[in-house]
Image (spheres, rainbow, N blue to C red):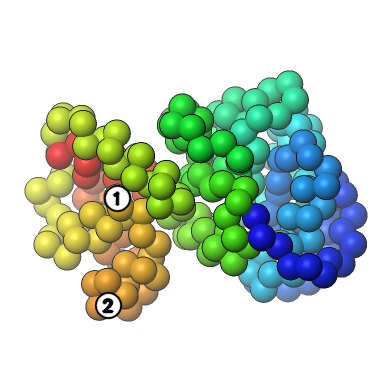
């Protein structure tokens, strides 16, 4: 991740004070102490997010997250002891509505699909530029599935080979089908709005309608149903 050159010191593994009431609280699980500090510093300099607490392993995160109730969790894949994927699966039983975005150096398909199956709401690479990472975190909080284009292509290719039809697709309007196709291709809400020539609020309205008609509650589930049609 490309971070700013100047950094304000950030206390490690402590609850940060909330500077703005509208900032989203982020927790992070990362075993590299230097990276934890760098990412925490970068998040704290952003307008919309605040690094609430960081953890060096999954076990300590599981013990504290139910009490902290953050708005978003960043999760490394490879951790000492419990893996990040195992941790996501356990966290989703405790906090099923907590968006969890994997942040990892690994772009292998197995890690990607195992993370999504465990309940992850996004999969980013650590080399993602800082501004792009923040955009992705915002999208995850809005119910999106942020993926690097390369990873989104892997998801699309995988599900296109599945031929099982799913009920509900035929009830989508033409514009809703356009929207869900763009979701499947990995575009963010803002990009979908630009491509469809509509406002961001209209995109969100389309997505809510898609979720209702397909009887799903996440972008991942909607994309899976659409690509299985």
Above or below, 82 against 140 in this view is above
Residue 172 appears in the figure: yes
Image location (x, y in percent) of residue 183: 31, 55
Element at label 2: loop
Return the residue found at the far top.
81
Above or below, 148 against 88 in this view is below
Q: Is residue 110 left or right of residue 126?
A: left
Image location (x, y in percent) of residue 162: 20, 30
Image location (x, y in percent) of residue 150: 41, 47
Residue neighbourhood size for the residue with mark 1, other residues' Cα within 10 Å, grouped as few (<14), some (14–19), many (≥20) = many
Query: Which residue, given by chain and number where applicable, does mark 2 sit on?
Result: 198
Element at label 1: helix
Residue 90 appears in the figure: no
Q: Give me the residue at 60% from left, 25% from top.
A: 86
State the residue in front, 131 or 117.
Answer: 131
Q: Are marks 2 and 1 in contact (CB under 8 Å)?
A: no
Query: Which residue, given by chain and number where applicable, does mark 1 sit on?
Result: 184
Q: Quadrant of residue 23?
A: bottom right
Q: Is residue 201 left or right of residue 46?
A: left
Q: Give me the residue at 49% from left, 46% from top.
A: 122
Q: Give me the residue at 87% from left, 49% from top.
A: 12
Q: Is residue 45 left or right of residue 162?
A: right
């Amino acid at each position: 991740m490309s971070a700013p050159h100047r950094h304000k010191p950030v206390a490690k593994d402590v609850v940060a004070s909330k500077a703005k009431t509208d900032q989203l609280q982020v927790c992070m699980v990362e075993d590299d102490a230097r990276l934890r500090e760098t990412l925490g510093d970068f998040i704290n300099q952003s307008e919309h997010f605040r690094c609430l607490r960081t953890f060096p392993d999954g076990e300590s995160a599981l013990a504290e997250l139910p009490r902290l109730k953050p708005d978003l969790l960043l999760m490394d894949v490879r951790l000492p002891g419990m893996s990040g994927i195992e941790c996501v699966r356990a966290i989703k039983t405790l906090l099923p509505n907590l968006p969890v975005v994997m942040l990892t150096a690994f772009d292998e398909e197995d890690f990607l699909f195992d993370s999504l199956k465990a309940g992850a709401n996004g999969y980013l690479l650590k080399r993602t530029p800082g501004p792009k990472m923040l955009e992705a975190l915002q999208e995850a909080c809005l119910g999106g599935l942020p993926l690097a284009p390369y990873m989104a292509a892997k998801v699309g290719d995988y599900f296109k080979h599945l031929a099982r039809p799913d009920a509900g697709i035929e009830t989508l309007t033409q514009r809703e089908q356009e929207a869900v196709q763009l979701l499947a291709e990995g575009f963010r809400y803002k990009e979908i709005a630009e491509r469809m020539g509509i406002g961001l609020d209209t995109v969100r309205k389309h997505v809510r309608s898609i979720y209702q008609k397909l009887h799903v509650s996440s972008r991942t589930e909607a994309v899976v149903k659409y690509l299985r049609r």
